[in-house]
Every structure is written in structure tokens, then in C-alpha cells.
Image: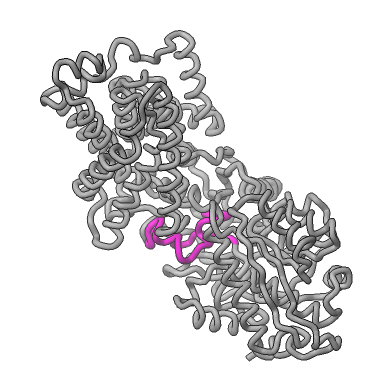
């Protein structure tokens, strides 16, 4: 029992970080119908930026979020303006797949040239520290990562529910035509939302770089997980992505501990397939598109 | 001086082919893609060898020209490159690429055309399972045997000091799990009880569930069949779980002196064992000269030289010596390399009929913040230190 509870704790902690990564992906899909398969590469790019700040200037990886997030927001806006906005017509979603995949490969290539392909990890002074709570081990970096993820998700929720921009986003998700007729500037909403989606990847990347060793090729595994999460949660649903990410974290950790790591990833896909057979739209795909 | 003397020896003409043009050698290397870093390390070793040989008059009086083509870390492209080297460019020799994955198909191409295939990095079962007669791997032993020295050392300890229980986390990879499996079988045979064993897939990012299982089993010894990334994560996980076994061996990860401390924290390296094929202070044939020239040519420090460069340099040393002995004839080269001893920076090599070296890997250990060879005794710089101290100290 102790092992299972420990696995659940581990799963919840890491699931929170995956929730943050996938929130940006599902937000962008909800608004633009763009599947940004570069999201994993953007997470890794942010991990490198945070690592560079830590290793060169001694900036704490969690504090680096304050710098990396705005920088990645600007990058996201630029990517949307240059690569994504021009996509029109019924083939736009498929074309966006190709373009964002090309972007992912481009980011990987640039990172390989600059940082090489050896593994990197940010090791702040508290990287080895662990709290023992009722006999369970809680690594401080994972707890901080979990907290940061929920703070960022909370800020995203506030942005979407308490601001004029957020209302415009939600209106665009629910009915783009009606939103435009009511005066919402769809282009502006899409551009800024893409930037917000990428900035979520930024914060998640800084956290990821403290928890795991990474190299430029780490995005392949990440994007497959993120896509699975947003499909399970329901494309376009941030709440669904959060639930699915936490579920993935817990299922994988428990299966790895109780059965075998070999079945850990597969077990999540079994759940994914099972849910899609019953609810093809995912857990929250119909009822809740954004929050 | 030993290296200079050796190189000078290669420069003297013995077969009378001094009037011919340069010796062309085709090499496919991963200069882009997943293996681009180790591919570049190998390129540095190859280029340094060619530069050094040419500076001393070449081989048999002929200069050496390397034709290095990028294979983008693709086995298909590597095989294509060797096909082109041999059938289109008619090179005199070919040297091996980086990694077993690319070596296996490339060696088969070379074998088809009767070319010797002296190679630095294809030490996995996939290469030797082909049972080719033209392959010569320039490391001390096949990769699967890299934990043997650790096993023999542990079993040589007084019984009271030996670990009684062990855990084996193993990456599902031809260069990782087979090493740990071979070690597990030997330890079990000697009465060391296995309290946990698992094989995890290569996409496993999070090692903490595995570590929590290890910590719960409380083994005296952890033997990790690891590669670099999971090797780092395993140590970090053990540190965070506050579980410090008396013995820790990882197949890969700790054997990278330039990388390991920065990935797990310098204070957590103490007492961790790994396997290696080369180290900068080795007194092997031509090694001091190689190290000096490497630092002079590429900068940095001796400790930062990747073993991949030494492995590639050793390929050149073997080639120079055998050409010197039998001339530039691939059939004669293959026949000659199956006999006798071949001194290199990797040690004195000899091979069985399918190209497996018959020597032993080095057992290396982190002691006082540095990585030292601790066995075999004839090359050891320090004695093994055990049991491993607690993390952080």
C-alpha cells in the first residue's frame, strides 16, 4: 500500500507539469483548430533557455520563468504571424500539422548546433533535497514544479475568465463567426492566444529542465504524450487536459511500480482507447471547450 | 616518446609502394542526427591520427587522405556511403562509423567486397552476430562484457564485505540490458540474491517509480544497465529517495568524466562504479602522445577527451601497423589481423574469428571527485573504494 500511495504522489506531481504543457496545446487547438506539434520542441527550447540562464548567470530555474515566459510569448506571436496565420481554407488544420512539425525539427536542429546533443539538466542547490511526509518522499524540485504549474494554470484561468481578452477567446472557441460579428478581432485573438499557448510551454520547460535530463531530441517523446493528453481530455478543453494529465501521471506511476515500467506508457493508451470508444470526443470534449 | 617512435616506425617504407598516390580511406560518420556528438568525437580521433601520420611521412611513404561522409545517424545512409566508397570511389581502405546500429549493416557491405572493417564503436551483439571475418573492434572487449571486471572484483571480496542483495534496473537496449543481465546471472550464481529486477523501455523519462521500488527493496547493490540519460536520472532518483546502496554500478553515465558530475551533482558521484575502455592517463601504446597532440590540436584538457576519439585513433594505429606489415591489400590485412597482438591507445588488442576483442574493460570509479581506473590491476591508478559513502559525501 505504501508503494501505491508513493506512486500516486509521484504521478500527481509530474501530472501537474504535463497539465501545464498540454494546456497551451489544447488552447491553441480550441481557438484555431491548429494542432501545434511543435509544442514539445517549444517546451525543450524553454528548458534550454532556462538552463542557459542558470548555468551562465546563476539564475534559479524557477525564477527564470519570469524571463523565459515573456520571451517565449513573443516567439509564439511571431510564429503565429509568420507561419500559421496565412493558413486558410479547409486544409488549414492538416497544413498546420506540417508547418508546426517543420518548426519542431527546425528548433531541434538549432538546439543541436548550439548546445550539442548531450544531456543537460539544471541542478539548483535544492535539487537533491527531499521532504519526508508521513513516511513518503517528496522531492522539493518536483513539489515546486507542481506548485508553479498550478500557479500558471490559475493565471491562465484568470486570464480566460476575468479579462476582456479571455471573453473574446471563449467566444471565439464557442462560435468564431458569431464572435466576429459581435466585434471580436479574430486575428488578434488567434495571435495572442498562440503566444499564450507557447508561454505555457515556456513555464513548463523551465520546470521540466530541473526534473529531467533533456537533449534536443527529447521533444519526440513529449509531443506524443501531450497529444494523448489533449485527446483524452477532449480537444480544446483545458480542464480536460488537466484531468487527463493527472490521470496519465498516476496511471503510469502506479503501473510502473506495481506491474512493470514496460507497461506504464501502454496502460495510459489502454485507458485512452477505452475512453474514446465510449466518448469519441474525449472526457470533456463536448461539454466544455475552454474551462 | 613511445608514440612518436611508433608513428615514426609507420613512416618507413617496407613494401616499396612509395611512388603511388595517397592512401584513400572512406569513413561514414554521424555528423548530424542523434549520434552527431559521438560522431564528431570519432572524427576528431580519425583526423588527428591522419594528421600525425602524415606529419611523419605517411604510411609506406604515402600520405593518408580521409574521405569522411555524413550519414545523418542513419544505418541505411551509412551502408550507402560504404557502398559508394568501395564501388564508386575505389578507396583503398574503409574505417568504421559510430555505434553498433550503423556498424552492423556497414560491415556487411565491406565484407561483400572483401574489405577489412576496423571499427571503433560497433561493439554490440548485432555486429558480432553477423559472424563476419572482416570485422575488428578496437575496444578491449565486446560491450556485453563491460561489467565483468566489476563482477569479478565484487566476488573476490571477503564474504562478509560482499553485497547480499542486489537490484537490477535495465534499459531495454542492446547496449544496456544485456550487460546487467550477464552480471545478474553471475551474481545470482554466487549467491547474491536479486530483490528487484525490471526492464524499462527507452521512452521512460521518469525513473522515480523504479527508484521507489528499489528503495523499498533495500538492496545492498544497484547494478544499472543504463545509457547516459537514464543513468543520470537513476542516480538523481536514488539521491532524492535518500537511499544510498553500498555498491552502485552503472553501465553508462558515470563513465563520462566531463558530463556526470554536472548531471547528478559533484558531491553525489563518490564511490560510483562504471566501465570504460580508455582513460587519459593510460600508459597504453602511444597514449601520452595522443593525449598531448589532442589537447594541442583541439584545446581543452586531457580529462575532457571523449573515449570515442581514442577509439577512432586506435583504428588508425591498427591500420598503420598492419599495412606496414603486409602492405595495402585488404585480404592480407584481414588475415594478418586475426593473428598476433596489436598495440593501441586502447591497449593491446587481439580478436577472435568474428572480430570480438579478447581483452577486458576497465573498471572505473569516482574517487575524490575524479574518475579513476581501479581495475584491472596492471592499469589501475587507485584501488577500489567501498562501501559507497552516503550521498553528498
Where in the figure is residue B319, as x and y percent of width and height?
75, 75
Instruction: Between residue B365 and residue B137, name the one nearer to us.
Output: B137
How is the rendered protein coloured? one colour
Where in the figure is residue B242, as x and y percent of width and height?
38, 47
Instruction: Verify whether residue B273 appears in magenta.
Output: yes
Name which residue lies at 49% across and 47% down. Answer: B230
Name which residue lies at 58% across and 67% down. Answer: B307
Asked whether the viewer can see residue B360, the reply is no
Where in the figure is residue A25, as x and y percent of width and height?
34, 30
Instruction: Verify whether residue B125 appears in magenta.
Output: no
Point out the stretch of residues depicted in magenta: B248-275
Toward the top, the furthest residue is A278
B4 versus A237 height, above or below? below
Name which residue lies at 41% across and 58% down. Answer: A115
Q: Quadrant of residue A197?
A: top left
Asked whether the viewer can see residue A195, the reply is yes
**Left of B290 or right of it: where is A49?**
left
Amino acid at each position: 500500500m505504501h508503494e501505491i500511495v508513493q506512486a500516486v504522489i509521484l504521478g500527481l506531481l509530474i501530472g501537474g507539469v504535463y497539465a501545464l504543457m498540454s494546456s497551451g496545446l489544447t488552447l491553441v487547438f480550441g481557438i484555431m483548430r491548429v494542432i501545434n506539434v511543435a509544442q514539445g520542441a517549444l517546451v525543450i527550447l524553454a528548458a534550454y533557455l532556462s538552463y542557459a540562464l542558470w548555468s551562465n548567470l546563476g539564475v534559479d530555474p524557477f525564477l527564470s520563468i519570469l524571463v523565459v515566459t515573456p520571451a517565449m510569448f513573443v516567439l509564439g506571436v511571431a510564429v503565429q504571424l509568420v507561419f500559421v496565420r496565412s493558413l486558410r481554407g479547409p486544409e488549414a488544420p492538416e497544413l498546420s500539422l506540417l508547418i508546426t512539425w517543420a518548426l519542431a525539427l527546425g528548433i531541434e536542429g538549432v538546439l543541436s548546433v548550439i548546445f550539442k546533443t548531450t544531456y543537460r539538466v539544471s541542478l539548483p542547490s535544492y535539487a537533491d533535497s527531499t521532504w519526508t511526509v508521513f513516511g513518503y518522499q517528496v522531492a522539493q524540485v518536483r513539489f515546486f514544479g507542481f506548485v508553479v504549474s498550478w500557479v500558471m494554470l490559475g493565471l491562465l484561468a484568470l486570464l480566460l475568465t476575468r479579462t476582456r481578452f479571455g471573453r473574446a477567446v471563449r467566444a471565439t472557441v464557442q462560435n468564431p463567426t458569431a464572435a466576429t460579428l459581435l466585434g471580436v478581432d479574430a486575428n488578434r485573438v488567434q495571435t495572442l492566444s498562440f503566444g499564450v499557448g507557447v508561454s505555457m510551454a515556456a513555464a513548463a520547460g523551465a520546470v521540466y529542465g530541473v526534473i529531467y535530463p533533456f537533449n534536443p531530441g527529447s521533444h519526440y517523446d513529449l509531443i506524443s504524450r501531450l497529444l494523448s493528453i489533449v485527446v483524452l481530455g477532449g480537444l480544446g478543453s483545458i480542464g480536460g487536459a488537466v484531468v487527463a494529465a493527472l490521470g496519465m501521471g498516476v496511471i503510469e506511476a502506479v503501473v510502473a511500480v506495481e506491474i512493470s515500467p514496460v507497461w506504464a506508457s501502454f496502460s495510459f493508451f489502454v485507458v485512452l482507447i477505452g475512453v474514446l470508444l465510449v466518448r469519441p470526443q474525449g472526457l470533456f470534449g463536448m461539454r466544455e471547450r475552454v474551462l | 616518446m613511445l608514440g612518436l617512435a611508433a608513428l615514426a616506425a609507420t613512416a618507413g617504407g617496407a613494401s616499396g609502394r612509395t611512388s603511388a598516390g595517397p592512401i584513400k580511406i572512406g569513413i561514414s560518420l554521424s555528423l548530424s542526427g542523434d549520434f552527431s556528438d559521438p560522431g564528431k568525437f570519432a572524427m576528431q580521433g580519425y583526423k588527428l591520427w591522419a594528421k600525425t601520420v602524415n606529419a611523419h611521412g605517411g604510411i609506406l611513404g604515402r600520405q593518408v587522405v580521409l574521405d569522411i561522409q555524413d550519414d545523418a545517424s542513419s544505418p541505411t545512409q551509412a551502408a550507402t556511403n560504404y557502398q559508394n566508397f568501395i564501388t564508386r570511389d575505389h578507396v583503398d581502405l574503409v574505417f568504421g562509423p559510430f555505434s553498433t546500429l550503423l556498424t552492423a549493416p556497414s560491415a556487411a557491405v565491406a565484407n561483400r567486397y572483401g574489405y577489412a572493417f576496423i571499427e571503433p564503436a560497433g561493439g554490440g551483439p548485432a555486429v558480432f552476430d553477423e559472424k563476419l571475418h572482416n570485422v575488428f573492434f578496437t575496444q578491449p572487449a565486446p560491450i556485453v562484457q563491460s561489467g565483468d571486471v566489476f563482477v569479478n572484483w565484487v566476488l573476490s571480496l571477503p564474504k562478509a564485505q560482499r553485497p547480499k542483495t542486489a537490484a537490477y534496473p535495465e534499459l531495454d537496449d542492446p547496449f544496456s540490458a544485456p550487460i546487467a543481465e550477464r552480471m545478474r546471472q553471475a551474481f545470482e550464481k554466487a549467491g547474491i540474491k536479486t530483490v528487484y529486477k525490471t526492464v524499462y523501455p527507452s521512452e521512460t523519462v521518469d525513473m522515480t517509480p523504479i527508484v521507489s521500488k528499489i528503495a523499498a527493496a533495500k538492496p545492498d547493490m544497484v547494478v544499472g544497465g543504463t545509457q547516459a540519460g537514464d543513468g543520470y536520472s537513476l542516480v538523481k532518483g536514488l539521491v532524492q529517495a535518500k537511499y544510498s546502496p553500498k555498491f552502485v554500478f552503472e553501465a553508462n553515465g558515470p563513465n563520462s568524466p566531463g558530463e556526470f558530475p554536472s548531471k547528478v551533482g559533484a558531491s553525489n558521484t563518490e564511490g560510483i562504479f562504471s566501465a570504460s575502455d580508455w582513460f587519459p592517463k593510460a600508459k597504453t601504446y602511444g597514449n601520452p602522445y595522443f593525449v598531448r597532440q589532442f589537447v594541442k590540436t583541439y584545446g581543452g584538457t586531457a580529462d575532457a577527451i571523449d573515449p570515442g576519439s581514442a577509439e577512432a585513433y586506435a583504428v588508425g594505429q591498427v591500420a598503420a601497423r598492419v599495412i606496414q606489415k603486409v602492405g595495402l591489400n585488404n585480404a592480407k590485412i584481414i588475415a594478418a589481423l586475426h593473428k598476433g597482438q596489436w598495440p593501441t591507445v586502447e591497449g593491446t588488442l587481439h580478436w577472435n574469428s568474428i572480430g570480438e576483442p579478447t581483452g577486458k574493460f576497465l573498471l572505473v570509479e569516482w574517487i575524490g571527485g575524479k574518475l579513476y581506473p581501479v581495475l584491472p590491476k596492471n592499469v589501475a591508478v587507485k584501488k577500489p573504494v567501498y562501501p559507497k559513502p552516503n550521498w553528498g559525501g
